[in-house]
Image: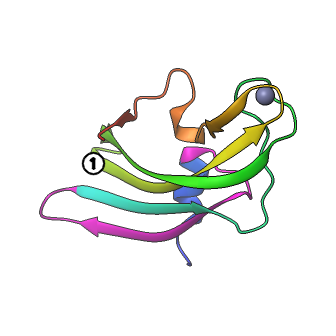
Amino acid sequence: MPGTSLYSSILGLSSQWHITDAALDSKARCLRLQITTRGGADFCCPVCGGAAKRVGSDKRRWQHDDLLSLCFMISAVIPVASCENCGTNRITAPWERSGSSFRSVE
Ligand SMILES: [Zn+2]
């Protein structure tokens, strides 16, 4: 989708992540993004950082109350990975990193 590279940069998305839709609700002053991961993308275990195998996904939503003076909503499908040492865990999305102002709304 053209026009999403600015949002990718703001969120610090690597090539593993893909914005599938971006819609601005100007009345509500809210930007809504749909994000998923690319089909064959590899992810590391979110606990130990070792090799992990994708075994499923988890759909979640996050909100930032004031980004560029807008409400900013993200709906995303996040991979769930299995690690030999740590078991099954959901991958940490780039916008969930420490210090992020996005909060889970589910
Ligand atoms: Zn692990």
**Number of residues whose C-alpha sits closer than 10 Å to that of mark 1, classed few (under 14), some (14–19) or many (20 or more):** some
Location of ligand 1 given as a quarter of the image: top right
Towards the viewer: 96 or 2: 96
The magenta-colored residue range is: 11-29
Please provide percent x and percent y for residue 75.
Answer: 40, 56
Q: Which residue does the image show at 63% across and 44% down from the upper left? A: 12
Q: Name the residue under label 1.
A: 70
Q: Which residue is depicted at the point 69% across and 66% down?
A: 38
Give the left or right position of residue 2, taking residue 63 as reference: right
Say which quarter of the image contains residue 31: bottom left
Q: Which of 49 and 25 is in front in this view?
A: 49
| Picture coordinates of residue 25, whole percent (x, y) | 22, 66
Vertical relation: 90 (above or below) 29: above
Q: Where is residue 51 in the image (x, y as percent from the top left)?
A: 87, 39
- Corner quadrant of residue 46: top right
Distance from mark 1 CB to nearest ligand 1 atom below 8 Å: no
106 vs 50: above or below: below
* Residue pictured at 74% horizontal, 58% vertical: 15
Residue 72 screen position, x and y as percent: 33, 49
